[in-house]
Structures are given as C-alpha cells and as structure tokens.
Image (cartoon, rainbow, N blue to C red):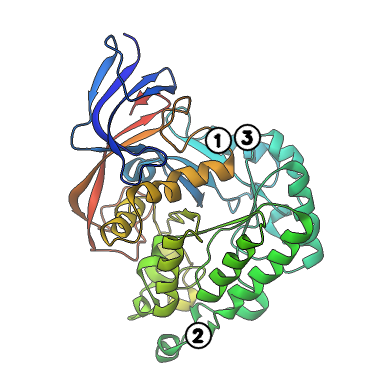
C-alpha cells in the first residue's frame, strides 16, 4: 500500500469559502498532495461528508480524550490551572505526553509560580520542556510591573501570552454581570467595564513590549472595540471566545442554573450580538470550547458558591456550525477560527488541509441531528449550559497523524 486516499469529500481548503469536492492523499503522517489520489493507496470513502482540519482547542482545563474525540478535536492547548500548577518543566513534560500518540496536548506554561500573579515562573525551562505558550490562567495579573516584565520575557522567548481579561479589583467576588437579571436574582455582580479596563492595560503593555498577547475570551462590545482598534494599529494581538458567549446571554442564569456560571460571566444581549458581529468581521480570531468539566461537588451548590466552567468539547463543533447556517461566516472561515488560527498562534504544522501539513483530519456529517444531554456526555462531567438543546453536526471519523482513529 502507498498511503491513504480520501475520496469524494467536500474538503475545506485554504482560500475556499465553502470547500470543494476533492481527493486527498496521505503518506505517513502528512498530507502528500491535494486534488488527486494514488492508485496504489488504501481508499477511504468520504462521499457526503465534510473533510476538515482537526480542531485545535485553544485553552482547555482538562485532558479529556473521549470528549475531544466526540467533538473532532485532535489537539488542545492545556491551561496551567492544574493540581499541581504547570509552573515547572516536569509538569509541562508530563502533560505533553498524556494523549499521545492519537491526541496531542500542548501544555501552556504558568506565567507565575503557583499561579500567584506575583513571581514569574521559569518560562524558558518550560519552553525547553515543550510549552508552546504562557498563560495567566483564570485570573488577571493586577501588578502592571510584573505584567510588563512577563511580556518582555515572552517576547524574548517568542511565546504567546494567553491572558484572562477581568480587572479583579472591579469584579471582586462577583458571579454575574451587572444588569436587570443579576438584580432580580440578587447575585453579586460587576459591571462589564471590568473587561475593557483589563484589556486597555494589557494592550498598552503589549505595545510597550512587542509581545504577542492572546486575549483568551473577549465578551463585551467595549472590549471588542479596543481589540479592533489595536489590530488596526498593528499590535501583535489575537483574541478568542467560547460558544457560550456567542449563543447565550445573562437570561440563561434564570432559575439559578449553575451550569451557566462562567468566567467571565454571561453578558447582556447587546454584548452577545456584538460578539457575533466580531466573529463575522474578523475581530475574533479563535473560537474555543473553554472545556472545564465540573462535577456535582462543584456545581450542585448555591449559585454564588458554585465553581465557574462548562464542559464544552463535545458541543463546540455542532454549536459553531450554526454560525454557518445563520449566514454569519462561511464554512472556510469557521475552520480558520477552529483550526487554522489556533495552529498559527501555537506555531504547529497543522490546522489546514495543505500539502506537507500534519494529516490531522475530521470527517463531518453536517446534518446529523442529536441532542445535547448532560447525563450522557462522554466528558469527565456534563456541566453544559446547552443541556437538552437539539443540534446538528457529528464527527464520523478522525484521522490523527495519518492514522484513522
């Protein structure tokens, strides 16, 4: 046999908004050529399916292989908020080996020791151990001096810094966004300006340092306007969002549903619509799952005491396909958000269907119906705010590094 031929699928190709029917030939771990087949190769029939680059989930909080497989995720950047924190080479090296060979984890180095926001960790050593980026974790670094030194360190090492964008001095112990819904529920809340304040500070320091800053979740119109203007000035920045902030507003908190307890919290409807517009106009670079499975011990509590987070890996693809169906983005643009841009940020040779790229591919039935069910999810926990939502789009097959899983 001479590799694998993938025949008859609608292939998501760079520069093609909706993909096109094409053959692929995979040899070893890489895509050998696009548009033709090898007569001696093994045949894989992809008729009626979309053949897309495997999703690269940028910023998950758990290595959850069954959930990633269900969702078509072939690589994930793992946040350093672990126990123990990923703040030394040994923990980075261990995390990077977890999923191989059929799933790759790209651990992000903790920006500070024990995630304390004060003492910069040994980032150079963690880069040598395999870290492809640095992250502040679930919190914002309040000390601007520490942040500037950190950014200069990351720029010197050519590593992106993933930041959480909420000014902790403004948010305090808030669990909701200030507004009518938080008031009716009596929840401690903070104004959405907490996001814009933190982004403005970090943009100023990014300009000073020249470092690449990735704003992991930008969820307000004011924050997105700042990102848009900074990009126009040529700053090395990128930003992301999760499906929760695209498809849910703070009305989802009704009934004190702790599955909708997120960080940053859900926003008002105007901010949600601004996020949709920012995906459509290119301001947002990445859509990630924010995968953070939380069991009953974290979620079956009073709303203000529940831990933030959602299990998002299994629903990421099906939910974001709605952006295509509703005409906000093309299919090609969707996989820029899910695969190509995350690969570019991490500097990995994947994320697009091109000759020479790693053969990380997913085969999607875009119309297959199913229902999100928190009790039946393969994730470590089923804490999804989309419980019982009917969706469309299932991954039927995954190829990782040239091998069918």
Which residue is label 1 attached to?
A: 348
Work out whether mark 3 precedes mark 2 in sequence or the reverse, and give the earlier one: 3
Q: Residue at x 52, y 84 (%)?
A: 188
Work out whether mark 3 precedes mark 1 in sequence or the reverse, and give the earlier one: 3
Cβ–Cβ under 8 Å for marks 1 and 2: no
Question: Is residue 300 visible in this depiction of the protein?
Answer: no
Q: Position of residue 70 (x, y in %)?
A: 31, 43
Q: Position of residue 107 (x, y in %)?
A: 58, 42
Q: Give the label, 3 or 1, closer to the camera.
A: 1
> Which one is nearer the viewer's eye here, 164 or 381?
164
Residue 147: quadrant of the picture: bottom right
Q: Residue at x 47, y 85 (%)?
A: 187
Residue 391: quadrant of the picture: bottom left
Quadrant the C terminus occupies: top left
> Which one is nearer the viewer's eye here, 320 or 65?
320
- In the image, 50: left or right of 116? left
Q: Secondary structure at mark 1?
A: loop
Which residue is label 3 attached to?
A: 93
Q: Position of residue 255 (x, y in %)?
A: 32, 80
Question: Is residue 337 visible in this depiction of the protein?
Answer: yes
Is 287 placed above or below 132 here? below
Which residue is label 2 attached to?
A: 178
* Crowding near the residue tagged with mark 2, few <14, some 14–19, many ≥20 C-alpha atoms within 10 Å: many
Q: Residue at x 64, y 50 (%)?
A: 85
Q: Position of residue 290 (x, y in %)?
A: 46, 56
* Crowding near the residue tagged with mark 1, few <14, some 14–19, many ≥20 C-alpha atoms within 10 Å: some
- Between the residue at mark 3 and the residue at mark 2, the CA separation in whole angstroms equals 41 Å
Residue 138: quadrant of the picture: bottom right
Q: Residue at x 22, y 38 (%)?
A: 49
Q: Secondary structure at mark 3?
A: helix
- In the image, 124: left or right of 366? right
Is 15 placed above or below 215 here? above
């Amino acid at each position: 046999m001479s590799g694998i031929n993938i025949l008859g699928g609608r292939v998501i190709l760079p520069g093609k908004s909706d993909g096109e029917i094409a053959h692929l030939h995979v040899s070893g771990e890489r895509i050998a050529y696009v548009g033709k087949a090898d007569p001696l190769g093994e045949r894989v029939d992809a008729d009626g399916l979309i053949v897309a680059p495997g999703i690269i989930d940028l910023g998950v909080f758990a290595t959850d292989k069954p959930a990633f497989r269900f969702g078509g995720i072939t690589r994930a950047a793992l946040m350093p908020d672990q126990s123990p924190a990923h703040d030394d080479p040994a923990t980075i090296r261990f995390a990077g080996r977890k999923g191989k060979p059929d799933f790759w984890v790209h651990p992000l180095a903790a920006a500070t020791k024990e995630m304390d926001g004060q003492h910069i960790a040994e980032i150079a050593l963690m880069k040598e151990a395999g870290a492809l980026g640095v992250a502040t974790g679930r919190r914002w670094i309040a000390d601007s001096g520490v942040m500037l030194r950190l950014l200069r360190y990351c720029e010197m090492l050519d590593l992106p810094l993933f930041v959480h964008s909420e000014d902790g001095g403004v948010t305090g112990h808030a669990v909701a966004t200030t507004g009518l819904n938080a008031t009716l529920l009596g929840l401690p809340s903070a104004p959405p300006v907490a996001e814009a304040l933190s982004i403005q500070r970090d943009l100023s320091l990014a300009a000073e340092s020249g470092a690449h800053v990735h704003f992991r979740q930008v969820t307000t119109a004011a924050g997105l306007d700042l990102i848009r203007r900074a990009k126009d000035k040529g700053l090395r920045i990128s930003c992301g969002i999760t499906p929760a902030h695209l498809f849910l507003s703070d009305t989802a908190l009704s009934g004190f549903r702790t599955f909708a307890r997120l960080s940053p919290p859900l926003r008002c409807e105007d901010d949600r619509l601004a996020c949709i517009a920012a995906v459509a106009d290119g301001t947002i670079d990445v859509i990630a799952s924010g995968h953070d499975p939380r069991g009953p011990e974290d979620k079956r509590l009073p709303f203000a005491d529940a831990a933030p987070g959602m299990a998002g890996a299994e629903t990421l693809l099906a939910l974001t396909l709605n952006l295509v169906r509703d005409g906000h983005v093309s299919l090609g643009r969707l996989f820029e958000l899910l695969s190509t841009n995350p690969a570019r940020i991490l500097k990995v040779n994947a994320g697009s269907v091109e000759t020479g790229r790693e053969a990380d591919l997913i085969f999607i039935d875009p119309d297959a119906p199913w229902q999100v069910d928190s009790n039946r999810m393969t994730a470590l926990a089923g804490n999804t705010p989309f419980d019982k939502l009917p969706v469309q789009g299932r991954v039927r097959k995954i190829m990782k590094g040239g091998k069918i899983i």
